[in-house]
Image (cartoon, grey):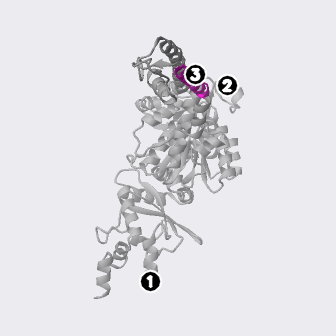
C-alpha cells in the first residue's frame, strides 16, 4: 500500500478510531469507579490494567465473564453500561473498513501504489507501452518474447485485466490510467534509469501527440515512437523531433505501390519487416490495372495518393463524397451492393480494395465483388483483430491489418534501427539486386521470417573484437559470421548494411575489416544470433575463427600456456 493509500485509510478511519478510544475510556472509568467485594468481605476496585484487560476480551465478542472476582449487582450494572459502546464502535469500524475496501477511489489508489512499486523494481531496460489494444498487445508479446521488459498504460480497465491473464514470457505491470497525464507516465517509469523509450499506440492521435510532447520536454534523450493516423498529426510530431511516426494507412499504401512497381523489393521489405519466426511467406503481387477503392476516409485517401504517383487507375466508391472531398467520378454508395459495384465498373476492374472502417461492410464488399467476378484481386481492411478468422475465411489476396503493420514496424525500429536506412537504400537498386537479396534471405532463414538486429563494434557490445585488435589481429565481417562448430562455413546470417562515419555500404564484402564504432545490420535465424553474441564476447572463439589458432582458456590454462 503506497503512502497515498495509507493516509487515505487514516482519514477514513479517524471517526471509528476516536469512537473506539472514547468508548473504551468510558468503559474503563465505569469499571474502575464501581467498588466490588472479595469473597471474604474485603472491598476492592478494578485497577486500570484489569479494566482494560477485561474490556479487551469481552467487548469485541460480547463475551461473558467476571474478573478477577465475582461481581456484585452494582458492578454488573456498570459492566452492561461499559460493554455496549465498544461493541457499537467496533461495528462502526468494521463497516467503515468494508466500505473503504469497496471504494473505487481507494482501490485505484492501492493499484497505483502497487504499479509504482513494480515499476521501481525493474532492473533491466524496458519500454513504456501506452495503449493495450490490438497493436499494444502485439507489441507487448513481441517485446517480452525477445527479453524486453515493458510497462503498460491504458484507459480501459478490461484491457488491463486482459493483460494480467495473458501468458507472457515476462511479467508486465499494467495500470488503468490515462497516458495523457504526465504523472501517469512518470508512474509507468518515464524517470526510471532503465527506461529505453515510449511507444504511443493508443487509438487517439491527440493522446499520442501529447505523449510525444511530454517525453520530448521531460526526457529528450529517450526514444519515442508514435502511431498517427492523421497526416497533420504526424507532421506535427515530426516537427518537434519525435524519433519515428508510424502511419499504418500511409505505410500500407506505400507497400501496395511498391508491390505493384517493384515486386522483388516488396518481397524483401515484407520479409525484413515481418513478425520474426513466423512462416516465410510469398507476398502476393497485386495487378496494375484498374482498382475500385471502397471508402474515401483517411485510409482510402492514402491509397489513392500512392496510386496516383505510380499511375495506377482507380475508381472511388464513397457514401458521403461531398464531406470527404472524394475526386470527380466517385460513385455514390458503400460498395456492399452489386448495383453499386457494377456502376463503378467491377467487371472491367482488376482489383477491389474494401477500405471502410466497418469490418462487416468490408467483408460484404469482397463477397459481393467475388460473386460478380470470381477472379478479382481482393484486398480488405481489417479493423479489429477479433474478426481475423472471418478475414482468413474470406481468402483475401491482400488483407490490410493496421495493428500488425504498426506493431511490426515499431518492433523493427526497436530491434534494428538501421533497417529503415537499408530499405531506403535498397529501393535505389534494380530488380536483379533485389532478387539476389531475397534469395540470400531465403537460404539462411530456414523457412521462417528472419530476426533482424544491429551489431555495434564497441567495448560493451563486442569486447572480443577490440581485444583481438589490441593484440594486432584484424577481424573481418566474415570472421564474426563464421560458424565455430563447422570449420569454413558461415552461420545462417546475412550482413545487410555496414554503417561507419565515412561510409554506408549495403551488402558489405565479408573481407572488410571491422573498426571501432562500426554498426552492422544483420538478419538470420535466432540460433545464429545467439551464436554470434557468444562469439562477440569470447576472445578465444573469435581468435579461432579469425586465425585458426586455439589457445588454452581459463586462468589456470592461460597461466600454464604462457610458461610452455
Residue 345 screen position, x and y as percent? 57, 28
Q: Where are the magenta residues, as a range?
A: 12-33
Residue 394 screen position, x and y as percent? 43, 30
Establish if 368 lies above or below 241: above
Quarter residue 181 falls in: top right
Residue 471 screen position, x and y as percent? 43, 82
Instruction: Confirm whether residue 443 shows in the render.
Output: no
Residue under label 1: 472
Tell me the element at label 2: loop
> Which of labels 1 and 2 is toward the front?
1
Marks 1/3 in contact by CB < 8 Å: the verdict is no
- Seen in the image, is 298 located left or right of residue 92? right
Q: Which mark is residue 26?
A: 3
Mark closer to the chain start, 1 or 2: 2
Q: Residues within 10 Å of mark 3 (few under 14, many from 20)?
A: some
Establish if 202 lies above or below 150: above
3D distance between C-alphas at marks 1 and 2 = 72 Å
Amino acid at each position: 500500500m503506497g503512502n497515498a493509500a495509507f493516509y487515505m485509510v487514516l482519514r477514513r478511519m479517524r471517526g471509528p478510531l476516536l469512537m473506539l478510544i472514547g468508548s473504551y475510556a468510558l468503559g474503563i472509568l465505569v469499571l474502575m469507579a464501581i467498588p466490588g467485594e472479595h469473597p471474604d468481605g474485603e472491598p476492592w476496585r478494578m485497577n486500570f490494567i484489569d479494566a482494560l484487560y477485561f474490556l479487551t476480551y469481552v467487548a469485541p465478542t460480547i463475551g461473558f465473564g467476571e474478573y478477577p472476582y465475582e461481581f456484585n449487582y452494582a458492578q454488573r450494572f456498570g459492566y452492561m453500561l461499559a460493554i455496549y459502546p465498544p461493541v457499537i464502535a467496533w461495528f462502526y469500524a468494521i463497516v467503515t473498513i468494508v466500505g473503504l475496501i469497496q471504494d473505487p477511489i481507494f482501490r485505484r489508489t492501492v493499484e497505483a501504489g502497487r504499479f509504482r512499486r513494480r515499476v521501481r523494481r525493474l532492473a533491466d531496460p524496458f519500454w513504456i507501452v501506452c495503449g493495450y489494444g490490438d497493436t499494444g498487445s502485439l507489441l507487448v508479446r513481441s517485446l517480452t518474447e525477445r527479453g524486453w521488459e515493458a510497462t503498460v498504460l491504458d484507459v480501459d480497465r478490461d484491457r488491463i485485466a486482459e493483460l494480467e491473464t495473458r501468458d507472457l514470457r515476462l511479467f508486465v505491470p499494467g495500470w488503468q490510467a490515462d497516458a495523457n497525464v504526465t504523472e501517469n507516465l512518470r508512474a509507468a517509469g518515464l524517470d526510471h534509469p532503465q527506461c529505453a523509450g515510449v511507444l504511443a499506440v493508443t487509438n487517439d492521435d491527440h493522446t499520442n501527440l501529447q505523449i510525444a510532447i511530454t517525453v520530448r520536454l521531460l526526457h529528450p534523450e529517450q526514444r519515442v515512437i508514435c502511431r498517427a493516423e492523421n497526416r497533420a498529426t504526424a507532421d506535427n510530431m515530426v516537427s518537434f523531433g519525435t524519433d519515428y511516426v508510424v502511419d499504418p494507412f500511409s505505410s500500407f499504401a506505400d507497400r501496395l505501390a511498391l508491390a505493384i512497381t517493384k515486386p522483388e523489393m516488396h518481397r524483401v521489405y515484407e520479409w525484413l519487416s515481418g513478425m520474426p519466426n513466423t512462416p516465410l511467406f510469398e507476398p502476393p503481387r497485386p495487378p496494375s490495372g484498374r482498382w475500385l477503392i471502397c471508402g474515401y476516409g483517411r485510409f482510402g485517401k492514402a491509397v489513392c495518393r500512392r496510386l496516383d504517383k505510380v499511375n495506377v487507375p482507380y475508381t472511388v466508391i464513397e457514401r458521403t463524397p461531398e464531406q470527404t472531398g472524394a475526386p470527380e467520378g466517385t460513385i455514390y454508395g458503400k460498395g456492399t451492393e452489386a448495383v453499386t459495384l457494377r456502376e463503378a465498373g467491377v467487371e472491367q476492374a482488376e482489383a477491389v480494395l474494401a477500405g471502410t472502417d466497418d469490418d462487416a461492410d468490408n467483408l460484404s464488399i469482397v463477397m459481393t465483388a467475388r460473386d460478380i467476378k470470381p477472379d478479382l484481386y481482393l484486398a480488405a481492411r481489417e479493423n479489429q483483430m477479433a474478426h481475423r478468422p472471418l478475414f482468413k475465411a474470406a481468402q483475401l489476396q491482400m488483407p490490410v491489418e493496421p495493428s500488425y503493420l504498426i506493431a511490426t514496424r515499431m518492433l523493427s525500429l526497436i530491434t534494428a534501427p538501421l533497417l529503415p536506412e537499408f530499405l531506403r537504400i535498397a529501393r535505389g537498386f534494380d530488380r536483379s539486386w533485389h532478387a539476389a537479396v531475397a534469395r540470400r534471405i531465403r537460404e539462411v532463414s530456414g523457412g521462417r521470417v528472419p530476426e533482424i538486429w544491429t551489431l555495434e563494434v564497441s567495448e560493451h557490445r563486442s569486447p572480443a573484437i577490440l581485444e583481438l585488435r589490441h593484440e594486432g589481429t584484424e577481424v573481418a565481417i566474415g570472421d564474426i559470421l563464421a560458424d565455430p562448430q563447422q570449420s569454413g562455413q558461415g552461420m545462417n546470417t546475412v550482413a545487410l548494411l555496414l554503417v561507419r562515419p565515412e561510409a554506408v555500404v549495403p551488402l558489405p564484402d565479408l573481407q572488410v575489416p571491422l573498426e571501432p564504432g562500426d554498426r552492422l545490420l544483420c538478419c538470420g535465424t535466432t540460433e545464429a544470433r545467439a551464436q554470434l553474441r557468444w562469439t562477440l564476447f569470447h576472445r578465444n572463439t573469435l581468435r579461432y575463427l579469425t586465425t585458426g589458432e586455439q589457445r588454452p582458456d581459463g586462468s589456470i590454462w592461460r597461466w600454464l600456456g604462457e610458461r610452455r
